[in-house]
Image: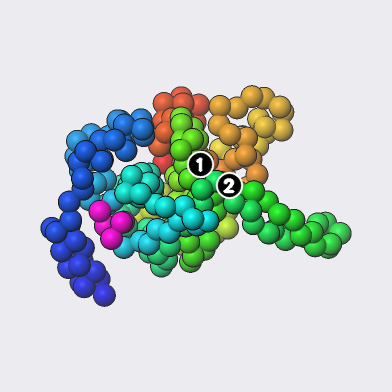
């Protein structure tokens, strides 16, 4: 399996080329890609080629996915796995893109055991073992500190490994205890800052759940790394 996949990937990389003019147009709108070195950009492009070959992207509600849309989503999805490899996104293939926010039905049980069913409008969602769902309108809102593609694909990285419901597992070569402790401490500190009503640079939505904290901090790490390094140096170092 591994051998065959490697062979296929080599073949894809040999035969596929990225349209450079298109890449330039897409990258110009993703300012955070400017921080990458030439070597990193080269590796990102290779990952993007493989991502587009191995994943299936579909437009929903009549949305036509242009090459530009596909490339933009692939570039943002591959940035978080630049040093992890495409293996981090194994076990699923689909990316579904809605024109705007999409409605999903949620069920939640309250403390009295009563189940509430309600509709929610979402900008993105990631299913364990299933697709990533994105709102193209929100992808277009990508700016410093907010990036729905990185957010949802960070959830995918979390779902991939041996982590638990709260946090993803440490990667090979990391101090697993330190990783966990740093995330837990940072999450506690963030929640107490939000509870105290202190304004936070980072989206307060990160206080919802440890898994959301990881996804939101991933957005910050890739799109506003200077802020993360300044305010959350230990977390920055772990990321
Ligand atoms: Zn989330």
Q: Nearer the viewer, residue 45 or 154?
A: 45
Identify the residue at image location x=53%, y=61%: 127
Quadrant (top left/top right/bottom left/bottom right) for the C terminus: top left
**Residue 80 visible in rendering:** no
* Residue 11 rendering spot, x and y as whole percentages: 15, 64
**Residue 50: within the magenta?**
yes
Q: Is the residue 88 above or below the residue 234 in the image?
A: below
Side of 59 where 110 appears, left or right: right
Tell me the residue that label 2 is attached to. Answer: 101
Give the CA distance from mark 1 to mark 2. Answer: 7 Å
Q: Which residues are magenta?
A: 49-53
Q: Residues within 10 Å of mark 1 (few under 14, many from 20)?
A: some
Side of 145 where 4 appears, left or right: left
Q: How many marks?
A: 2
Would the CB of label 1 be found within 8 Å of ligand 1? no
* Residue 80 rendering spot, x and y as whole percentages: 38, 46
Q: Earlier in the sequence, mark 1 or mark 2?
A: 2
* Residue 61 rendering spot, x and y as whole percentages: 53, 56
Identify the residue at image location x=37%, y=46%: 69
Identify the residue at image location x=17%, y=68%: 7
Side of 208 where 178 appears, left or right: left
Q: Residue furthest left?
A: 14
Tell me the residue that label 1 is attached to. Answer: 137
Q: Residue furthest right?
A: 112
Q: Tag 1's secondary structure? A: helix
Q: Is the residue 162 above or below the residue 102 in the image?
A: below
Give the main secondary structure, helix, strand or loop, of the magenta stretch.
Answer: helix
Q: Residues within 10 Å of mark 2 (few under 14, many from 20)?
A: some
Quadrant (top left/top right/bottom left/bottom right) for the N terminus: bottom left
Identify the residue at image location x=71%, y=33%: 195
Tag 1–tag 2 contact (CB < 8 Å): yes
**Residue 115: within the magenta?**
no
């Amino acid at each position: 399996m591994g051998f065959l996949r490697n062979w296929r990937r080599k073949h894809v990389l040999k035969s596929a080329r990225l349209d450079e003019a298109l890449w330039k147009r897409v990258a110009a709108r993703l300012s955070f890609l400017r921080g990458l070195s030439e070597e990193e950009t080269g590796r990102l492009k290779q990952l993007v080629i493989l991502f587009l070959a191995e994943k299936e992207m579909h437009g929903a509600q009549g949305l036509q996915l242009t090459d530009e849309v596909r490339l933009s989503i692939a570039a943002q999805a591959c940035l978080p796995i630049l040093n992890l490899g495409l293996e981090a996104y194994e076990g699923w293939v689909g990316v579904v893109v809605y024109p705007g926010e999409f409605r999903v039905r949620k069920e939640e049980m309250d403390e009295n055991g009563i189940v509430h069913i309600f509709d929610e409008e979402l900008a993105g969602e990631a299913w364990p073992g299933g697709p990533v769902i994105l709102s193209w309108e929100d992808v277009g809102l990508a700016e410093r500190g907010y990036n729905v593609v990185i957010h949802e694909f960070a959830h995918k990285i979390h779902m991939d490994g041996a982590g638990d419901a709260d946090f993803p597992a440490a990667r090979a070569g990391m101090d697993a205890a330190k990783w966990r402790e740093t995330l837990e401490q940072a999450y506690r500190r963030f929640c107490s800052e939000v509870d105290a009503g202190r304004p936070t640079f980072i989206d307060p939505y990160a206080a919802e759940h440890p898994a959301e904290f990881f996804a939101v901090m991933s957005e910050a790490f890739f799109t506003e790394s200077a802020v993360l390094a300044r305010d959350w140096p230990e977390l920055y170092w772990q990321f």
